[in-house]
Amino acid sequence: MISLKEFIENMELEPVVMVDKDELDLETSDVNRPGLQFAGFFDYFAADRLQVVGKAEMQYLMSLTPEMRKERLDKYMSFGVPVVVVCRNMPCPPEMVDAAQRCNVPLLRSRLVTTRFTLLSSAYIGAKLAPRITRHGVLMDVFGIGVMITGESGVGKSEAALELVKRGHRLVADDVVEICKVSDTRLVGEAPEMVRHFMEIRGVGIINVKNMYGVGAVINSKSIDMVIHLELWDQNKEYDRMGLNEDFTAVLGVKIPKLTLPVRPGRNLAIVIEVAASNHRLKKMGYNGAQELNDRVTAKILNS
């Protein structure tokens, strides 16, 4: 659900008619412009969407007689639309105000032109309604790649992240990552407001990364492009040494490339994570070093 108060504040709206409810009953980010409804056609009316009244709809309304305008608006509001926003700071006709009050529908006004408001409101509602999940881990921005570091407690996630911060990369979240599915193929992670920019280092305690290393060392949110899982080195386990086979993990139905890095004393994890992020960027650009070496070896064998 979306808070009515937050919607008004974030979209910079002016209340014309306020109602006795705290949340907007919106389940989709799609928008409806009620031109057909004002003309009297209510078949297939998407009454569950945000209703946006632009200049064309308002001009048509004002061309009707007061009696016809009242009839159309009463029927329109009777469908229980969640909210109506009038754009361009256009004055609302008295019939619209009365109908909104009788049907308990919030009536708001925006200074923005209709297309601009539609774009911004759709993005805002989409972000609020997007599926969310909380995961244990550290999220970093490494060379522009969103790297989520996971692993058991105490394996060294925060220490690796701190070394990355010292090397010029940016912290998004430590220990708790709130993940939002913004599209079918994209996840965005951020830190909860309470612990944003803080990091726990065992033996030292809690530090504020922004205050200690500057505002350039932190970022509020970042897309999650890859997952690096840290685990204690197991000498009986066979680890991937070529990188030809890609592993994936699914979060909220989105597949994300995953690497497993073994941890042992003396291994500089920050450098390895930097290399992994750079290699991931190269793969996205169409170059795979492991595949090129494999092709060279195969060609050598075939030509010998």
Image (cartoon, grey):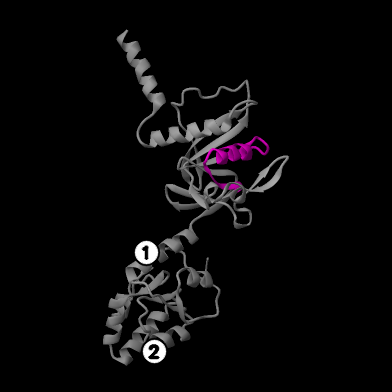
- Judge whether 182 appears above or below 121 on screen: above
Could you give the CA–CA distance between mark 2 and mark 1, rounded to whole angstroms?
28 Å
Looking at the rendered structure, which numbered label has been put on residue 119? 1
- Judge whether 300 appears above or below 142 on screen: above
| Residue 157, magenta (yes or no) | yes
The quarter in which the C terminus is drawn is top left
Q: Residues within 10 Å of mark 2 (few under 14, many from 20)?
A: few
Q: In the shown orientation, is residue 268 left or right of residue 70?
A: right
Q: In the shown orientation, is residue 51 left or right of residue 262?
A: left
| Residue 146, magenta (yes or no) | no
Image: magenta residue range: 149-176
Q: Quadrant of residue 54?
A: bottom left
Q: SS for tag 2?
A: helix
Q: Quadrant of residue 294?
A: top left
Q: Residues within 10 Å of mark 1 (few under 14, many from 20)?
A: few
The residue wearing badge 2 is 94
x, y percentage for residue 69? 33, 87
Residue at 52%, 34% in the rendered image: 273
Name which residue type carries label 2: Pro
Name which residue type carries label 1: Leu
Q: Residue reaching furthest top?
A: 304
Q: In the shown orientation, is residue 287 left or right of residue 234?
A: left
x, y percentage for residue 62? 29, 86
Residue 44 visible, this angle: no
First of labels 2, 1 by sequence position = 2
Q: Quadrant of residue 96?
A: bottom left
x, y percentage for residue 38? 31, 80
Residue 18 visible, this angle: yes
- Judge whether 86 appears above or below 224 on screen: below
Q: Nearer the viewer, residue 20 or 207?
A: 207
